[in-house]
Image (cartoon, rainbow, N blue to C red):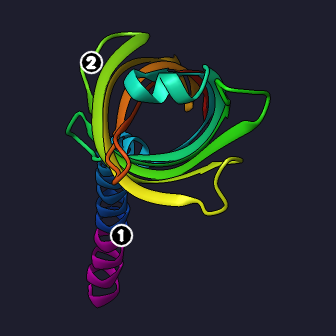
């Protein structure tokens, strides 16, 4: 009788542990399925692009339209349609008075608000930056603070896609403001 009771107890425990393990596995899979999309959304995206830099106002009197290259890293906030983007850019302008070049190098940080959408996702952004302007006419480069705002759209899936963006930039300086519009197209990974 003792052997029979011990066997029944052992069989009950084996069946119960198997059922408990099965429930634990199911619960773990459900938790992963719920958490994984939010974790993927929070991943950083590398952005690489280039385009046209069009000077405005007094800055347009000093330089002609130029070109630029951009590299950035964008990190999304899970569940919310906002993200933070850090970028570096190099702009090259031709001097309006001659064939010499002027160069603008900047580092910016932006807040990005995604406006949703399937496939094509429009967004707005705004931020601050530090801008280093160097022209061949002066010996020293000038570093000033500035701000920017813009509109863009991204397209893609599975972490790879493209983007297009128009950005207005205002750089405040002692010798006057430098304003320009940067039109950029590129890829995001």
Above or below: residue 63 compared with residue 29: above
From mark 1 to mark 2, how far is it between C-alphas? 55 Å
User: Which residue shows up at 79% across the image and 28% down it?
Assistant: 99
Side of 43 relative to 13 (left or right): right
Which quadrant of the structure image shows residue 115? top left
Front in this rendered view, residue 20 or 162: 162
* Residue farthest toward the right in the current orientation of the protein: 99
The numbered dot on residue 11 is: 1
Residue 86 drawn in magenta: no
- Residue 162 appears in which quarter of the rendering? top right
Residue 128 in view:
yes
- Residue 105: x percent and y percent? 58, 49
Instruction: Give the left or right position of residue 189, taking residue 82 as reference.
Output: right
Q: Quadrant of residue 11?
A: bottom left
Q: Is residue 3 magenta?
A: yes
Q: Nearer the viewer, residue 101 or 28?
A: 101
Q: Which residues are magenta?
A: 1-13
Q: Residue at x 42, y 50 (%)?
A: 108
Please provide percent x and percent y for residue 160: 60, 28
Task: Name the quarter where the C terminus is drawn.
Answer: top right
Query: Which secondary structure is most common in the magenta stretch?
Result: helix
Residue 32 visible, this angle? no
Residue extending furthest toward the bottom? 2
- Which is more N-terminal, label 2 or label 1? 1
What residue is shown with label 2? Answer: 116
Secondary element at tag 1: helix
Percent of width and height locating residue 165:
45, 20
Q: Quadrant of the N terminus?
A: bottom left
């Amino acid at each position: 009788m003792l052997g029979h009771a011990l066997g029944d107890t052992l069989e009950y425990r084996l069946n119960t542990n198997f059922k408990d393990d099965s429930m634990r596995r199911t619960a773990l899979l459900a938790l992963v399925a719920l958490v994984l999309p939010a974790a993927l959304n929070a991943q950083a995206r590398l952005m690489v692009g280039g385009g046209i830099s069009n000077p405005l106002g007094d800055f347009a009197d000093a330089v002609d339209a130029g070109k630029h290259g951009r590299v950035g890293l964008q990190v999304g906030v899970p569940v919310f349609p906002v993200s933070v983007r850090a970028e570096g850019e190099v702009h090259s302008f031709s001097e309006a008075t001659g064939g010499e070049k002027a160069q603008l190098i900047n580092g910016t940080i932006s807040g990005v608000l995604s406006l949703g959408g399937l496939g094509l996702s429009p967004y707005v952004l705004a931020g601050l930056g530090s801008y280093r302007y160097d022209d061949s006419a002066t010996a020293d480069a000038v570093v000033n603070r500035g701000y920017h705002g813009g509109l863009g759209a991204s397209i893609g899936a599975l972490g790879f896609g493209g983007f297009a963006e128009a950005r207005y930039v205002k750089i405040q300086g002692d010798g006057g403001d430098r304003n320009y519009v940067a039109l950029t197209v590129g890829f995001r990974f």
